[in-house]
Image (spheres, rainbow, N blue to C red):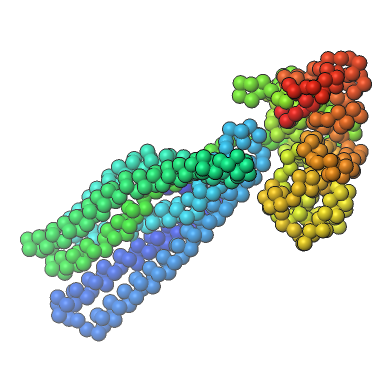
Amino acid sequence: MISIFRKFFRFCGDQRKLFYQSLFLSLLHAIFEAIRIPAIAIVLSAMISKTMSAGTVWATLIIMLISIVGCIFTRASSTMKQTVGGYTVATNKRVEIGERLKYMPMGYFNDNSLGDITSVTTNTAENLQDVATRVIMLTTQGLLTTFVIILVILIYDWRIGILLLIGVAAFLAINSRMQKKSNKLSPKKNKADITLVSAVLEYIQGISVIRAYNMDRQAGQTVDRAIEEHEKINFKMEKSFVPYMCVESAVLKLFAVLMVFLSVAFYLGGTLPLLNCLLLVVASFLVYAQLDSAGNYSALLRTLDISMDQINKIFENPVMDEDGRDICPEESDIAGKDILFHYESKTVIDHVSFDIPEKTTTAIVGPSGSGKTTLCNLMSRFWDVNEGCITLGGSDLREYKLDSLLTNFSMVFQNVYLFRDTIANNIKFGKPDATMEEVEAVARQACCHDFITALPEGYDTVIGESGSTISGGERQRISIARALLKNAPIIILDEATANVDPENEALLQEAIVALTHGKTIIMIAHRLKTVQHADQILVMDQGRIVQRGTHDELLKEGGLYAAFIQMREKSVGWKLGGRPA
């Protein structure tokens, strides 16, 4: 229990001071609770000695009033600090996770599902802001209040005080058993949380396919099973903890009864004054009240522990630019030297070298799975190479800070992702501080101004997640406008027109011409007409560059490229690019 408290305070960072202040206020609250006992002692003493007077009544009322007001103030202040601290810690951790993920290698996202990452930023962070602070504070407050009251009782009779300490020890022993049970079940609950989030996300993301193939029932069963498993593990946890909670409560009440019994026995035996006996009988109703409540929440300490471990695990993963520098290259030429890249045990790029001069167009072609997209991802440092190096302007990519590096790249992907936001804000992703005049200017260049202004709210129109409320061609043109606004010297094109209808293709080609003017162009090529005018063509197969040259040179050379050109209409094994590798 103590180790979890320490981990929690370390985890909270700068916000720990709020929790320390809350603990201090909890201690004051315990003292204000405890001074009720002397107030009761004054009344009992006056009743026994038959010296009750207005002064006695007023003295008692003042002490009780101080106790009540003090308890209200300390409880309110403590709760407020806990609440602010809890929500601030959760907010900060979510922001820190978001910042951290920006600099993670793409392999991290291959190893961790969207459900895992989403669960950490939702369920896990929610546990911290809502459960963690309540559990930590109620548990510590319960222990503090109990020990302060026992300390006061020790003044009146050390024997009863020792009995109460034994009761606390018995409570903690039972609680320790409950914590061990929680250690076994909390990881299963965490896994069930992640599985449920993953199942729901997969169902929603695949809803169009599910409907198209009439698989509602089968797909729904996966979500239903996840929900049932989530319900089962939560019920199992409650079912497992309730007996321990009942035993804890019973033990505390038993020791309270023993306190009454022994107090009366000591009085009858002549070793305890009547005043002290009556006072201890009354105090028996107060001593364990807070600890009993704390015991019911302490079962969640292990869940809190796992939540912290999950978040800390993200920060244990190395980011890609810890030692990077802000570099502004004078030229935008890119070179690769004997690059080797493998994912797990599979070699994806096998000792590749290349030179892409500034302001030239390089097309990369090859069969599906040949490594085209991976090579482009390495150039923009979505991953780091295992061997060799890639340079931009003569500097190794690993010498750059990631933000500094990516300012040199604009990317237009085949599958465009737009955010659930206004069209203007989606375009501004290329330059967040851009004016509306700049946004409209690039929209005109990207041939999307007309369709945007035709919408009911124009540039303020909110589009659906992933741009689901506009057509594929319109999404592509918005992504090109975004790239135009960024105005980076290097453009990576993942064949932006591959899946676009002929009606939109002419507009997209016009937009791409505007985007690529005077830039260093790297394109993953799917169509002959997009590569035949390239300054150089890199032909990839099985992770290697097997040919390089211009269109005419490669046709004369023969080999893989020429074979494709000759057989492109009949080819079924592969076509130029197919699906990006």
Query: Which of the pair 220/479 is nearer the observer?
Result: 220
Q: Extreme bottom residue here?
A: 54
Q: Quadrant of residue 27?
A: bottom left
- Answer with left or right where residue 397 lies relative to residue 168: right
Of residues 52 and 579, the one drawn nearer to the viewer in this rendering: 579
Residue 540 vs 478, above or below: the answer is above
Residue visible at 75% across and 58% down in the picture = 461
Residue under the point 85% across and 55% down: 450
Q: Residue 537 at x, y = what percent?
A: 85, 24
Q: Is residue 515 left or right of residue 237?
A: right
Relative depth, front residue between 189 and 311: 189
Please identify the quarter of the rendering in which residue 207 is found.
top right
> How far across and down, in percent of the image, does residue 567 sit?
82, 20
Q: Residue furthest front?
A: 214
Residue in view at x 84 percent, y 41 percent: 502
In the rendered image, residue 66, in percent from the top left (x then y), is placed at 36, 73
Q: Is residue 10 above or below residue 364?
A: below
Can residue 49 be seen in this snapshot? yes
Q: Position of residue 579 (x, y in %)?
A: 73, 30
